[in-house]
Image (cartoon, coloured by chain):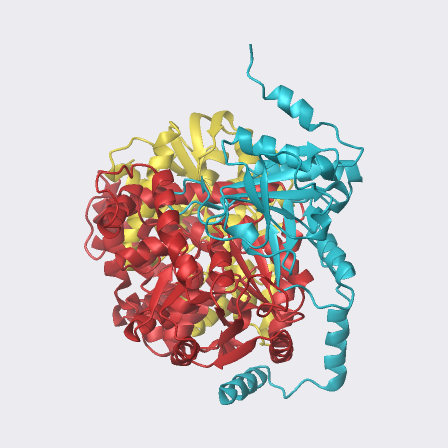
Chain colours: A yellow, B red, C cyan
């Protein structure tokens, strides 16, 4: 299958390792992977701020950049959700672009969901000796039904023990511009998340969205915790030796 | 009720700093979801019923004129009267006129959010009539001169010590040394204090969870029984309610009732669900002599046919509020008006205006938990986004965000430029953060770094690395 | 106010982008209403036979802190009631609904049980009423208002005792409404239909559940299963006798 990687702006800027982990996993699943150069953002910041016009313009760019691939895969439930759920809403009533939006939506996936639900991947070959807990990023969970897929694959990582996080499904407080506009409330939410993570006794916390991970990692460090924060893709791809955890220097 | 939604940020900050509130919210934010979860586990048909509930409400809204006229004809046929009110002022005027017509001095009240919406208590007091709240939570906050912080548990923001303090201060004829350490004692005291009020009231005012067009009935759902005493004992019963409470038949009401208690408190059914039709009948030994329904619009009819119509499906269960992490952090008073949480974020701007209530639909991460628990499947985040669209179009959002967004979008539409700038930013920030891997402070990001570290970028953009590896 | 009425209705029609519904559409809606069509009904109690429904009713009612004893006939009810009141340390007097369905209950079975018939007054501590139906799905009682069944009996006294006959147990709320409609025939539905599920309660203070907020603190059900009682009042007496 010819798969195009939707990098996401956060991965591009903050942590390319996640992009390479995604490529590695997709190739392990038997896909040929390309990365269209003419991609930047999915348009969600504009969309969620009520700026439909900019969101539409960016979406049209995405249609062009990702035309012709069998599938589009993003290591982010938030961006994949934007394309799958919200692009069709963005083009409601547009006879030309609505079909394009629906067509693209039908072949766009969050990474772990693609690996398990489409590629039928059942196990990875990675090894990581850790007690790990997992945060369910909201968009992936509620817009795309991503819940069991990362857990399936993590269960196959040699040496990894998963402890479920109480409140795994409660928002971490990132919410894009929310954490800037309502910082006090955001701080309370991430503080609660941090307390829940610490209470599990886990050595590491994983999630499928870098926005959540930056938020959670930032809080853990500020609270003086020594809990490793990584994207689930890095662990599944066996790249934990190649890159330090989020927020650690090389 | 006077709105303080404009100062949402300051309200929220006060809520976050309020230790009693935080303790109370801590109990609620795990308790409610747990109990609801247990209840719906026991009902395999729950998911299917959500869809049924949604379609009952949608159908009713599409034919609301028909059902309202039918409803009115049935109320009249059973000996009651319907008073139509476009505005809060018309509601207050209608209630006052009814009270005056029977020389009412004392009015007991079952819980009514519409009464809060129109400021009924203040209005009655200003006109020499004493309203006494009878729902325990409403009674407590009435004594404290506070607004409700939740639509079904109005005093949820208080800890028991605060309630005890209030009772000691307000129930002055009782022994000042009596113990009020436990909820049991306070409950018994409220029961004893309010019983004579129930018996002495001239008029009883309730809300309505549902109105049934088929029969001209009002339905109230309580656990305390206060609503029933309020509407049965006085000579006059006034139902203060709104247009969208209507459902076509008793069978439709029963379907929605199966969703309501489970979604609200995790109960199978509330202790008292009462269907009332008209005043007392010949031969009845009790019941009100007069039955009035005051039916409020206040902009609801204008929501029909708009992108906000779905909000009119709301059955006021509070599931969205109980599952909202923003509500759980800031508390209900932060929202500044009658309706808090996600349903308040959507409904409030439509009732008091987006200029007043603009913060409410913005103070959300769109986590979607509210929509996932709504028994009638209201797409709450979507409608909050529609409010944001309206604000954006009217330039109501702060200029710094609009500009920042415009710049970002402009660059994002120029991939070559974007990639060049991205690579520069990565190298600069990556280099600046190379020693620790994160920043304790970062210019332009101080809002973030005030309370969290900021992980440093790895130092190269993905696209530039990918281009290199391809060659 | 009629101006408000016209404006509101006109506003709704304008929002819906139409005028009045045409007569055919209206007739369809009226027919739909008259059919009393049921929506999806949970299977919980519908797949049970009658004895199982009765058991489910009892289980669900007890789950919400109603108490249940069984009696073999209406004639035994006063004894069961007196026994209950004594066990709860309550005075042996009550106000009873003047309803024909309770006529078979002898008024002078035990000299210590004083019974008055009528509506409830402020001083009444215990009431005794019939019900119209007992709904198994959630242990809910359906009571209706009427000249012989005043509503105050259900709410004013501290203790509310309800006589339920086995044949009044139905599976669902819809069944109870059908039963009510059948009983009323062409007569309009009663002024008040009470669905009562357990005693009064509140959780308004720190979410502690306390019984007896404003309505009755105790809801006691005497389940009369003529000839089919699995327990009798005598068995209950023995069971609650102090252990040696």
Residue B389 appears in the picture as rendered: no
Q: Is residue B258 left or right of residue C225?
A: left
Q: Position of residue C59 (x, y in %)?
A: 65, 35
Q: Is residue C132 left or right of residue B414?
A: right
Residue A120 quadrant: top right
Q: Position of residue B278 (x, y in %)?
A: 59, 70
Q: Is residue C196 above or below residue B278?
A: above
Residue A66 quadrant: bottom right
Q: Tell me how many marks there are.
A: 0
Q: Which of these two is toward me, B279 or A92?
A: B279
Q: Which of these two is toward me, B168 or A6?
A: B168
Q: Is residue C143 left or right of residue B347?
A: right
Looking at the image, which residue is at 28% across and 67% down?
B4
Which quadrant is home to the N terminus of chain B?
bottom left
Q: Position of residue B61 (x, y in %)?
A: 60, 73
Q: Which of these two is toward me, A190 or C157?
A: C157
Q: Which of these two is toward me, B4 or C106?
A: C106
- Of all residues shown, which one is farthest toward the top? C244
Residue B354 quadrant: bottom left
Q: Position of residue B136 (x, y in %)?
A: 39, 51
Residue A91 appears in the picture as rendered: yes
């Amino acid at each position: 299958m010819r798969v195009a990687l939707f990098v996401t702006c956060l991965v591009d800027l903050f942590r390319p390792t996640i992009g390479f982990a995604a490529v590695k996993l997709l190739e392990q699943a038997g896909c040929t992977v390309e990365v269209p150069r003419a991609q930047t953002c999915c348009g969600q910041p504009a969309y969620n701020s009520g700026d439909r016009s900019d969101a539409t313009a960016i979406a049209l760019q995405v249609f062009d950049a990702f035309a012709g691939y069998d599938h589009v895969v993003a290591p982010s439930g938030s961006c994949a959700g934007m394309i799958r759920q919200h692009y069709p809403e963005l083009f409601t009533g547009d006879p030309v672009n609505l079909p394009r939006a629906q067509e693209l939506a039908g072949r766009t996936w969050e990474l772990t969901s693609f690996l398990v639900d489409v590629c039928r991947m059942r196990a990875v070959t990675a090894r990581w000796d850790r007690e790990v807990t997992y945060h369910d990023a909201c968009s992936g969970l509620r817009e795309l039904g991503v819940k069991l897929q990362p857990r399936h694959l993590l269960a196959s990582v040699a040496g990894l023990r998963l402890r479920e996080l109480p409140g795994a499904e409660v928002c971490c407080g990132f919410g894009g511009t929310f954490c800037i506009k309502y910082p006090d409330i955001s701080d309370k939410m991430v503080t609660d998340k941090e307390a829940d993570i610490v209470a599990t006794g886990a050595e590491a916390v994983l999630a499928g969205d870098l926005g959540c991970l930056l938020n959670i990692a930032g809080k853990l460090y500020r609270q003086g915790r020594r809990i490793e924060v990584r994207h689930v893709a890095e662990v599944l791809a066996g790249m934990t030796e190649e890159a330090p955890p989020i927020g650690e220097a090389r | 009720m006077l709105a303080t939604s404009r100062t949402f940020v300051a309200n929220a900050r006060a809520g976050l700093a309020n230790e009693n509130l935080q303790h109370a919210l801590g109990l609620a934010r795990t308790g409610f979801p747990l109990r609801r979860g247990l209840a719906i586990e026991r009902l395999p048909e729950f998911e299917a019923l959500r869809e049924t509930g949604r379609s009952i409400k949608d159908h009713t809204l599409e034919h609301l004129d028909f059902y309202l006229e039918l409803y009115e004809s049935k109320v009249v046929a059973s000996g009651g009267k319907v008073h139509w009110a476009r505005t809060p002022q018309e509601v207050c005027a209608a209630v006052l006129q009814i009270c005056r017509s029977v020389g009412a001095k004392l009015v007991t009240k079952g819980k009514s959010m519409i009464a809060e919406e129109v400021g009924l208590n203040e209005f009655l007091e200003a006109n020499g009539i004493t309203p006494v709240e009878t729902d325990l939570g409403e009674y407590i906050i009435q004594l404290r001169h506070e607004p409700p912080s939740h639509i079904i548990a109005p005093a949820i923001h208080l800890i028991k010590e605060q309630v005890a303090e209030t009772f000691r201060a307000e129930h002055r004829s009782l022994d000042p040394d009596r113990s009020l350490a436990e909820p049991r004692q306070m409950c018994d005291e409220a029961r004893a204090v309010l019983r004579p009020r129930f018996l002495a009231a001239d008029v009883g005012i309730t809300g309505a969870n549902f109105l049934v067009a088929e029969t001209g009935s009002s339905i109230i759902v309580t656990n305390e029984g206060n609503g029933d005493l309020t509407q049965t004992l006085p000579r006059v019963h006034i139902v203060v309610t709104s247009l969208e409470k209507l459902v076509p038949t008793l069978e439709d009401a029963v379907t929605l009732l199966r969703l309501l208690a489970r979604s609200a408190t995790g109960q199978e059914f509330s202790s008292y669900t009462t269907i009332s039709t008209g005043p007392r009948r010949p031969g009845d030994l009790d019941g009100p002599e007069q039955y009035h329904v005051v039916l409020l619009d206040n902009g609801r009819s204008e929501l029909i046919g708009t992108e906000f119509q779905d909000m009119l499906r709301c059955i006021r269960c509070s599931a969205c509020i109980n599952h909202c992490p923003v509500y759980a952090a800031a508390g209900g008073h932060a929202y500044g008006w009658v309706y808090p949480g996600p349903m308040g974020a959507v409904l409030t701007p439509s009732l008091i205006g987006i200029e007043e209530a603009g913060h409410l639909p913005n103070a959300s991460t769109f986590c979607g938990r509210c929509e996932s628990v709504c028994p009638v499947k209201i797409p709450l985040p979507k409608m909050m986004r529609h409010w944001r669209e309206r604000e954006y179009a009217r330039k109501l959002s702060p200029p710094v965000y609009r500009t920042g967004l415009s710049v970002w979008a402009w660059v994002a539409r120029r991939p070559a430029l974007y990639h060049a700038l991205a690579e520069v930013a990565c190298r600069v920030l990556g280099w600046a953060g190379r020693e620790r891997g994160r920043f304790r402070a970062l210019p332009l990001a101080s809002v973030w770094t005030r309370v969290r570290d900021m992980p440093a970028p790895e130092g190269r953009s993905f696209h530039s690395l990918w281009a290199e590896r391809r060659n | 106010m009629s101006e408000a009425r016209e404006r509101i209705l006109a506003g709704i029609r304008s929002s819906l982008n139409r005028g009045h519904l045409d007569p055919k559409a209206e007739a369809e809606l009226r027919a739909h209403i008259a059919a009393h069509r049921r929506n999806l009904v949970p299977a919980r109690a519908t797949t049970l036979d009658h004895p199982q429904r009765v058991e489910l009713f009892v289980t669900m009612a007890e789950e919400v802190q109603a108490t249940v004893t069984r009696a073999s006939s209406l004639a035994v009810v006063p004894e069961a009631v007196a026994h209950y009141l004594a066990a709860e340390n309550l005075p042996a007097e009550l106000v009873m609904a003047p309803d024909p369905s309770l006529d078979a209950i002898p008024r002078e079975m035990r000299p210590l049980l004083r019974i008055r018939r009528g509506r409830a007054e402020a001083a009444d501590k215990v009431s005794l009423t019939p019900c119209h139906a007992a709904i198994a799905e959630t242990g809910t009682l359906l009571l209706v208002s009427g000249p012989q069944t005043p509503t105050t009996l259900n709410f004013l006294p501290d203790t509310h005792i309800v006589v339920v006959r086995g044949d009044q147990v139905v599976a669902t709320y819809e069944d109870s409404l059908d039963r009510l409609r059948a009983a009323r025939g062409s007569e309009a539905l009663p002024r008040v239909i009470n669905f009562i599920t357990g005693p009064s309660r509140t959780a308004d203070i720190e979410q502690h559940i306390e019984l007896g907020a404003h309505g009755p603190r105790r809801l006691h059900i005497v389940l009369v299963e003529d000839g089919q009682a699995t327990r009798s009042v005598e068995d209950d007496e023995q069971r609650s006798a102090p252990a040696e």
